């Protein structure tokens, strides 16, 4: 019979009310956005609010939902970068870090192999000359003792180091399996660090994803320009603490093996010769915050983790009275003399910086150092005016489609077309409510998915209404015709929408960012369309029929 249980009616109406309540903040986008930004700023500041923040918070009631649909790069404007990670730099860093340990191991065999000396080699290789070439097998065996198995299924049975010998030269480099693993690890680490740096400045819903073997796509809505984004993420912020060997006034001097020459940031024309292998690196930092030094000048306070604190304490204890260089991105920003052992695990970076650069440096250090340099292959800036044009065009397209569908439905099915049109409006609200609740990002392809959903949303109603028309010719009364119409149309509606949902899932899994946006809105639209067609429209039809009790109906 044509009836819907009370609990089902309450559930249908409740779901519609909740969905529309979550969609409502998007009608007051700027007010709710200002409210959300002020709330986040107050929470970050520990609860203290300025008068401006209090005014912004008052723009939207706290008891109402305040989630918004995030606007993508093509709707809000922002910056687009395609970066290539120079993974080869990691090979060189691994070999430089291996040298002290390899030197110690070979030194233990000096009575057999004689003197050892590191010689120049291509990046990613470590070459050592052995005095007694006839004992090279001993050196090779000692070097292979430092290798460990590669921890992947594809690299099973292989070590991370490839050790070879030719004449009196021992060559050590990463094995092919270890290089593949290192490449993957470097890209993933770069992705995470870029994401943390972007999140630190409070941008909304950035798109940061891997493309190909060694590239990263970065799209950040709401940021001023691609140059601003590059300044934020393009700096490697590699902080190291290196022993000072000597100072000079020329950058053309030839450093010894295992040494580097770097310029002073504070004193132009001054160059430091440093040991290439640092004592402590920025990777062992746990926190960095902007502060002021003893003279009131801007500075950055930092703290090491237990491992870094131990190494820092041991070195400073053994080298009191010696200079110690603080190196940031291949520039010596400070080279203080160690006055006493520093065992607390904390320190301070000061020098020629203003408050803004001190805050920026703290952000970069907290996010961590990029494992390798990023080369930007593509950069674009999308202005907010272009984004607004896209929003306006999408709004017009959706409105035209909505009005056209309503006109055709009412013209074709009369009162039942009105019911379907009301359900279509509820459907649109539910789509935006779900997008807001899950924090999804809406892009131009996403708007295309919504416009497509407008057309698809009435397909289910058309099937139902046509079935009711057929049943009116044979069924005993209008109530029976309506009930049989919904029953007989159910299988066709489910089959048609499940196949479309499968296609949307494939697009989401295999597609890139814009395609994913289209797939998300299409998937949500399919679910809400079936719900509104089978339940919302039916509820309105049943409620009307119970009140009017017509002897005949016309579809």
Image: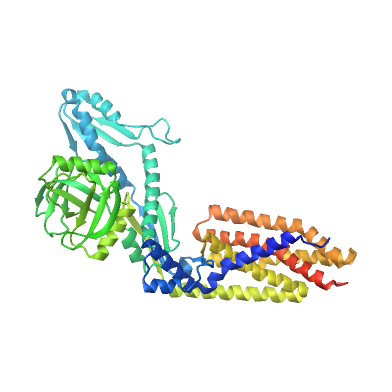
Identity of the residue drawn at 30% across and 47% down? 283
Which residue is more in the foreground, 418 or 14?
14
Q: Position of residue 397 (x, y in %)?
A: 59, 74
**Image point 55% across, 52% down: which residue?**
509
Q: Nearer the viewer, residue 249 or 8?
A: 8
Specify the quadrant of the image occupied by residue 467.
bottom right
Residue 211: give x, y in percent of width and height.
44, 53
On the picture, is 272 further left or further right than 68? left
Can you give x and y, in whole percent of width and height, for residue 424 in the image?
Answer: 67, 69
| Res. 500 in view | yes
Going by the image, does 474 lie left or right of 467? right
**x, y percent for residue 555:** 81, 71
Q: Is residue 146 above or below residue 233?
A: above
Indicate how the structure is coloured in the image. Answer: rainbow
Q: Is residue 121 visible in this depiction of the protein?
A: no
At horizontal 81% and vertical 72% (from top left) the residue drawn is: 547
Q: Nearer the viewer, residue 417 or 531?
A: 531
Labels in figure, total: 0
In the rendered view, does 221 fall on the left or right side of 105?
right
Identify which residue, 449 or 537, lies in the foreground: 537
Q: In the figure, residue 205 lies in which quadrant?
A: bottom left
Left or right: 10 in relation to 122: right
Against 51, residue 111 (above or below) is above
Q: Is residue 166 above or below residue 456?
A: above
Quarter of the image containing the N terminus? Answer: bottom right
């Amino acid at each position: 019979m044509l009836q819907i249980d009370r609990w089902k009616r309450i559930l249908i109406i409740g779901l519609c009310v909740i969905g529309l309540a979550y969609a409502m903040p998007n009608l007051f986008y700027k007010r709710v956005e200002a409210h959300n930004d002020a709330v986040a700023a107050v929470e970050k500041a520990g609860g203290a609010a300025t008068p401006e923040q209090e005014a912004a918070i008052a723009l939207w009631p706290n008891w109402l939902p305040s989630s918004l649909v995030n606007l993508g790069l093509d709707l809000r404007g922002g910056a687009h970068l395609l970066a290539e990670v120079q993974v080869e730099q990691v090979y060189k860093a691994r070999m430089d870090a291996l040298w002290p340990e390899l030197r110690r191991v070979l030194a233990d065999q000096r009575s057999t192999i004689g003197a050892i000396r590191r010689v120049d080699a291509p990046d990613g290789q470590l070459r050592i000359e052995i005095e007694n070439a006839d004992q090279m097998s001993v050196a090779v065996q000692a070097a292979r003792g430092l290798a460990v198995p590669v921890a992947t299924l594809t690299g099973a049975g292989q070590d991370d180091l490839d050790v070879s010998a030719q004449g009196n030269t021992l060559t050590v480099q990463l094995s092919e399996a270890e290089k593949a693993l290192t490449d993957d690890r470097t890209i993933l680490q770069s992705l995470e660090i870029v994401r943390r740096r972007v999140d630190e400045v409070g941008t909304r819903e950035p798109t940061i994803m891997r493309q190909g073997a060694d590239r990263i796509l970065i799209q950040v809505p709401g940021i001023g320009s691609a140059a601003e984004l590059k300044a934020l993420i393009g700096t490697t912020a590699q902080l190291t603490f290196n022993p000072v060997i000597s100072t000079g006034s020329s950058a053309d001097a030839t450093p010894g093996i295992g040494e580097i020459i770097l310029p002073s940031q504070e004193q132009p024309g001054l160059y430091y010769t440093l040991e290439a292998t640092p004592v402590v690196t920025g990777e062992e930092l746990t926190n960095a915050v902007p502060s002021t030094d003893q003279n009131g000048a801007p500075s950055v306070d930092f703290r090491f983790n237990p491992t870094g604190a131990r190494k820092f304490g041991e070195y400073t204890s053994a080298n009191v009275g010696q200079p110690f260089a603080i190196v940031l991105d291949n520039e010596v920003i400070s080279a203080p003399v160690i006055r006493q052992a520093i065992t607390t695990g904390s320190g301070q970076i000061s020098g020629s910086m203003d408050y803004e650069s001190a805050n920026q440096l703290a952000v970069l250090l907290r996010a961590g150092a990029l494992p390798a340099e990023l080369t930007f292959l593509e950069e674009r800036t999308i202005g907010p005016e272009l984004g607004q044009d896209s929003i306006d065009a999408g709004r017009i397209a959706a409105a035209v489609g909505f009005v056209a569908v309503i006109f055709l439905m009412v013209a074709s099915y009369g009162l039942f077309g009105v019911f379907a049109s009301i359900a279509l409006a509820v459907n649109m609200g539910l789509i935006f409510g779900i997008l807001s609740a899950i924090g999804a990002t809406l892009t131009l392809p996403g708007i295309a998915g919504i416009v497509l959903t407008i057309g698809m949303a009435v397909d289910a109603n058309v099937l139902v209404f046509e079935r009711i028309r057929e049943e009116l010719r044979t069924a005993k009364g209008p109530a029976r015709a309506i009930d049989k119409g919904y029953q007989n149309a159910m299988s066709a509606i489910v089959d048609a929408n499940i196949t479309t949902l499968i296609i949307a899932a494939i697009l989401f899994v295999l597609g890139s960012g814009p395609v994913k946006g289209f797939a998300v809105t299409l998937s949500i639209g399919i679910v809400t369309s079936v719900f509104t067609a089978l339940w919302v429209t039916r509820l309105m039809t049943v409620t009307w029929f119970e009140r009017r009790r017509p002897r005949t109906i016309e579809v």
